Structure formats: C-alpha cells, structure tokens
Image (cartoon, rainbow, N blue to C red):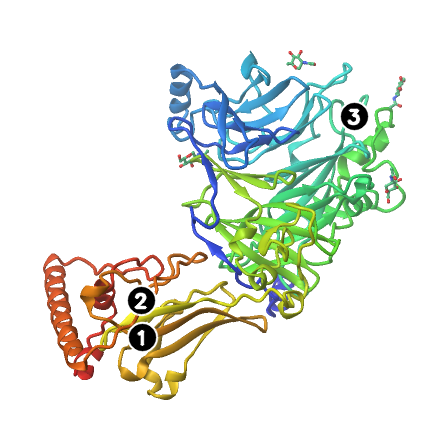
Amino acid sequence: MAPSVVLLLCLLSSVRSLPPPRTSFLLNSADRPLVHFSLPDVHNTTTLLLSDDGSTLYVGARDAVLSLDVRRSDAISLKGKVEWSPSDAEINECRIKGKNPTGECPNFVRVLQPINSTHLYTCGSYAFSPHDAYIDAESFSMVQNDLSAKGRCPFSPFQRNTAITIDSELFTATTTDFRGSEPQISRHFSKHGRPDVNQDSVSVLEEPTFVSSASDPAGQKLYFFFNEVGKEFSFVDKLKIARVAQVCKDDVGGQRTLQKKWTSFAKAPLVCQSPKQLPFSVLQDVFTLQPPEGSNTSETLFYGVFTSQWSSGPESAVCIFKLQDIQTVFDGSYRTFNMQTHQLSPLLGKHPYLGRCGLANATDSDLEEVKKSFLTSGVVKPVTDGPVVVSSGQQYSRVAAMRTKAANGKQYTTLFLLTESGFLHKVVLFDQGARVIEEIQVLTQPQLVKSIVLSSTKGVLYVGTSEGVTAVPVAKCSVYRTCGQCVLARDPLCGWSPTKGICTSLDSSPDTKVQDLENSNVEEVCHQQTRTSRDTEISVNLNEVATLQCLKPSNLATLTWTSPQFSNLPEKHFVQSTDGSLSFLVSASTFGTYSCEAEEGGYKEVVASYTVRQMAPPRSNPSRDLNGHHDTHSWKEPVDITHKEKSYYSELVVVSLLLVICICILAFVGLHMWRQRKPVHKVNPLVRKSPSLRLKTDSFTAASLPSELP
Ligand SMILES: *[C@@H]1O[C@H](CO)[C@@H](O)[C@H](O)[C@H]1NC(C)=O
Ligand SMILES: *[C@@H]1O[C@H](CO)[C@@H](O)[C@H](O)[C@H]1NC(C)=O
Ligand SMILES: *[C@@H]1O[C@H](CO)[C@@H](O)[C@H](O)[C@H]1NC(C)=O
Ligand SMILES: *[C@@H]1O[C@H](CO)[C@@H](O)[C@H](O)[C@H]1NC(C)=O
C-alpha cells in the first residue's frame, strides 16, 4: 500500500494545459460548412475505410455495407449498398440468449478491409455470432458468405477490436467468445500452406481493450495497441496500462512447443506522463503517421490519445511514439513469469531469440523461455519525453494527424482530436507548445462507437457516427477576413495573399502567402495590408436605448470601446455586455463616434466603428438596422440615412408616444407570460435581426426607464 500513497502524494503540481480554442463553430455554422451523409434506413455507420485513391469511402453500418462517392469535397453520394442482416430466427436465438433484439442483435459491421485488389473483407457481430463475407468492390455485391467468423470480430457490438490485412492475410485483435472475456491476437487466411496462428494462452493478455494496429513492412512486423490491467505492479489493484504488442507477419509457430502459436509475441508498456504527474494510462486511440516519402520506416510516428484513470474530471493527453523506439524496446531485455511465485522478474543472461522473427526451428528450451518471457523490461517513452498536448477540461477520444509544409518551408503537425462531447479540435504543434486553432461541433450528442478517417491529400476528415457520415474540410481559410486575422489564426494551411487580398489555402495558387506561425507578428507581416474598418452610421431617437454590436474575431481577443462621448457622461451610462455590444440611453450628449477595437497577442484592430446621429422623423425612414452585423464573420453595413434637422419638441412627442406604446406592449407581454407561466425566451443577440421597435423593448431595463424619462 505504501508505494501507491507515495506515488499519489508526489503528483500534485499542475501541468500546463492547452489554452481554450481560438475560434468556435457550432454545428452547421454557415462559416464552417460540413457535408453530412445519412440514409433514413441505415444507422451505426461507424466502420470507415477510405480507398487508396481517396475517391471512395466504404462504410460498415448496422445490417449494411455502403460504398460512398467522396470525389467531390462538397457532396457525398451513395454508389452502392449491400444489405446484410441476420434472419428472424437468428435474431430470436440472440434474444433468447438474453441480448437486446434491436440494440445488440442486428449485424454491426466491425471489420472492413481490402483483402486483395478486387475484394473487400468484412466481419460483423451478426446476432452475437460473428459472420464474415467478401464483397466484390467493382460491382459492390456480396460474393461469399462464410458461416462462422469467431476470432475475427467481437460478438458484442460494443467491444472494441482492430484488424489489418497484409498480402491477403488478415490479422485481428478481438475477443473470441460470447461473454467477451477471451481476447486473442491472431492471423487468418494464412497463405503458402502455413497454419493460422494465435497467442499461446489467454493469460498473456489481461482484460485488454484493443484500440489500433499498424504494420511495418520493412521489419516484417505488426503492432497492436491496447489497454490492459497491469500485473507488474502488484500494489495497485486493477491498474490500467497502455501497451504495444508485436508479432512477426510470417510467424508459423514452433514445431513441438508453441505449435500454431506466435513465437514472436511480445508486449511493452507505453508511457505517457508529464514529470511529477500521474500517468495518462488509458489509451483511447492511436493514429499512425507514415514518414515522408523516401524515409526509413522506423521513422513512422504513432500519435496516441490517453485519458487518466485517476482524474475525476475530463482530462486527456497526446503522446507521440516513434517506431524506432518501439523496435529498440522489443530488441532489449525481458521480464519472465515465475510459475512458483506468480511474479514477473527480470530475466538475466542473454536471450537473443526473444522478440525475434524466424523461430520456427528454435529448440524447445528456447521456446519454453519465449512462452514465459513476453513482457519487455524497457518501456516505450514518447519522442518528446512527455505529452505534446495536455488538456484539463477535454476528454479526447479519437485522433488523426497530418504533416504540412508551411509558407516558410518548415513542417508542422496538425492534430484533429474528437472530444467526448462531439467537438473536433484542430490542434497545431508549435515550437512553444500546442494551440487549439479551431473548434468545430460535429456531433449533436456523445457517441459510444465512433470513428474518424483523414484524407490528407484531399484535405477532408470523415467522422462516422450512429447517425451518418460527416465530412469536415481540414481548413476554411476564408473565414479570416483580414490579413491580421489570417496571421493571428496561425493555421499552417492558410496564408494571406497580398495580391488577392484574401486569406487562402497555401496550395491554392503559386503566389506568395503571408504567414507567421510562431510569432504571429501581424504588424511586421501585414504592414501594407491593414484594413480600414468602414464606419457605420446609426440614426437614433432621443431616450431610446442604442445597442452597438461588436463581435470578437476570436475567443482570445479582448474588446475595448472608445469614444469622445465617454468623457461627457458617467461611466455607468454605457454598458458593455458579455457579447461585446455597447448599450446606452440616447441623449444629446451621446451623439458622436464610437469605435470597438479587438486586441489579441499585442495586435490591435478596429473591428467596428459607428457614428451615432439623431434620427429623422420615423415616417421618412421606416426601416433601419441597429444591429449592423448578422453573424460572427460576415456583416452588412446598414444603409446611410441622411440626417435632417428637426425641432426638439416634435421629436419629444414622437419619442414619448413610442415609449408609451413600448411600455404598453411590455406590460401586455409580461402579463400574458405571467398568466401562461412560461419561461421568458431569451433573444440571442447574435441572431437578432428584428426591427428597431422590438430591439428597444428588449433592451429597456425597468430601472433605467423611469429615472431617465424627460
Ligand atoms: C480476392 O479474394 C476473393 C475472395 O477470396 C477471390 O474470390 C478473388 O479471386 C480474389 N482476387 C484476386 C485477384 O486474387
Ligand atoms: C532504418 O533504420 C534502422 C535503424 O535506424 C536501420 O537499422 C535500418 O537499416 C534502416 N533501414 C533502411 C532501409 O535504411
Ligand atoms: C526449418 O527447418 C526445415 C527443415 O527441417 C527447413 O525446411 C526450414 O526452412 C527451416 N525454417 C527456418 C525458418 O529456418
Ligand atoms: C447504434 O446507434 C444507436 C442510435 O441510432 C445508438 O443508440 C447505439 O448505441 C448504436 N450502437 C452501436 C453498437 O454503435
């Protein structure tokens, strides 16, 4: 018990957590459009496979497999559909075994892999009795329907599994029984007459959750990423540990010992931990980033998303592991399982055959050692020693990564992290740390089963959920309207084109683009590109409340209003709301100019400026727009209204009349609502497009009304 207490006590200092997202887009925001695909009769579209040329997205769903045309970035269309469901009798059998007939007994497709140049292999949970099938990719029809696929995908649609095909052989990691308690890593459809192999005993894996798999063609090895209960630390009960396991692709097992069992199976801990902190030990997802063309495959990087077994709130981290480091650990020393003490202890002496390929003819005594010594002594540490991203406040569950070349020729990594609550965070890894440059809502509600697939050549990320498939473009540079905003965005995919005067994708045209990812020194890079904000004229009546809108260009900006009028009146006369708008009761001393300035990272930009004038009689100008803007990034300038001189008295009469009408309406509405006992509906100031009369009633406060009346 003592060591765990010590462990807990030394972990109380805090880590530098990810700053909040710079910009946020809610679901179906007009500024950051997404493409949705769904069919009324198809659900649980959560197993995704992108064709090599990026033109087709294959989708494993509930009782169906789909082929989607994704050649266009603005549309997804259905190319083919294969229906594949258990019979009524099979569903009934599943129900009798105690499973939910609608939630668990349909056929949830869990493996979709290209098995050769012409066919796809698929495996589904099929009424808690896994079945598999081949699909002809050309005609998109099912050609062969095998009976049992035990060991190729799980019985339960909620258990995680992973599969990978190499040279028409299928490698899977899944549970293999009805109860879901017998995990197995195995090879199927073995070629050249060699046997199918799996691991020696179920005890080499301890209640694992399989997360991901990858292959290293050069090293002839496969890697499986998973979580399990760690048995090497006997002092903590049910300690979760993230692992990577290896097997050799061509392993055929031993001759007498380890017949038809992996002789190359080994596993190693993956450590994702900040100094003096508790480890992030629960692996959620792994993305494999291939090295640039022509590089050694040992440069392959694995981006792992971890959560913490210990934290009470949402918390997660991303660690990057290099294949070379994993190879080094598997080439190192091992621990051995002592049959007498049931403990793992370091294995002394030289054992060069451990973790190696080609042990088909190894001696029985060597293979006996292999059987007991499958856990490495060394741990796999991230390339940066600790996490590259730590977020206290977000529970990340899926990750994709892309490497892009910035305007300065430097490579940057952009991560796409899916939060449990259904937002996609676009995170760029800068030299001074990670930043969330965009937050995009992609799901309406949390999902148990979901997946993401990145097409970095097309610049689209596909999200598969229980409702359908959503395509998210990796960038939308045109949301940044000014050179300043384009540079402050720090998006490696976007740059300001001084010739065109727009923020645009770096590879859109060969002209030079302005960027300053590390320093975002706008003054320096945008010196000739400063936008002069257009002045908006607003005409108002005396004693009405004027509300001047000002929208933050980013969540990180702070807004400041300036006006010569501020010196005429007490400070409390002007109210700045949390949405950035400025409200005040119009009097003779409030006519004049107002300007709203956004400050971010030391750079200041006027985002709105107004001239408030006295209103001409209402009959001469029935429509006007106090709002100025309509949504976050596009705003209309209101029509200019020529100001006419009017006598103070007639103005006063008109205003008083209007006020009386307003008060009557307010009283009536209030009474009506009180009677109906309905909650008062709050008007969102960002979408308010109502005529001025409505605006005034909304803006009046009971306190300011009587005291300020003429
Ligand atoms: C691909 O696999 C399918 C199913 O096993 C088989 O029918 C087909 O002949 C194979 N095609 C090639 C080109 O090997
Ligand atoms: C790749 O790198 C590893 C380790 O750095 C080295 O052993 C191997 O020979 C290299 N392979 C190639 C093809 O260069
Ligand atoms: C194992 O020995 C057999 C003959 O006994 C030989 O044919 C085979 O190539 C050997 N395999 C390996 C991997 O050395
Ligand atoms: C299937 O989708 C439904 C919603 O349509 C969801 O409630 C359920 O959890 C999903 N099941 C699986 C296995 O993903």
Image x and y of residue 689, in percent:
30, 57
Disc number lying in front (3 or 1)? 1
Disc 2 residue type (three-letter) = Ile
Eyeballing the image, is 209 above or below 121? below
Give the spatial CA distance, label 3 vs label 2: 80 Å
Q: Badges 3 and 1: C-beta atoms under 8 Å apart? A: no
Judging depth in this view, the residue of 367 and 563 nearest the camera is: 563
Give the spatial CA distance, label 2 vs label 1: 9 Å
Disc number lying in front (2 or 1)? 2
Task: Work out whether residue 703 can be spotted.
Answer: no
Q: State which quarter of the image contains the C terminus.
A: bottom left
Task: Work out whether residue 478 can be spotted.
Answer: yes
Q: Badges 2 and 1: C-beta atoms under 8 Å apart? A: yes
The residue tagged 1 is: 613
Q: Badges 3 and 2: C-beta atoms under 8 Å apart? A: no
Image x and y of residue 91, in percent:
40, 20
Earlier in the chain: of badge 2 and badge 1, it is 1
**Which residue is found at the position 42% from the left and 27% from the top?**
42
Give the spatial CA distance, label 3 vs label 1: 82 Å
The local secondary structure at tag 1 comes to strand
Earlier in the chain: of badge 3 and badge 1, it is 3
The local secondary structure at tag 2 comes to loop
Q: In the drawing, what numbered circle is on residue 641?
A: 2
Density class for disc 1 (Cα within 10 Å; few <14, some 14-19, many ≥20) is many
Density class for disc 2 (Cα within 10 Å; few <14, some 14-19, many ≥20) is some
**Which residue is found at the position 37% from the left and 67% from the top?**
549
The residue tagged 3 is: 250
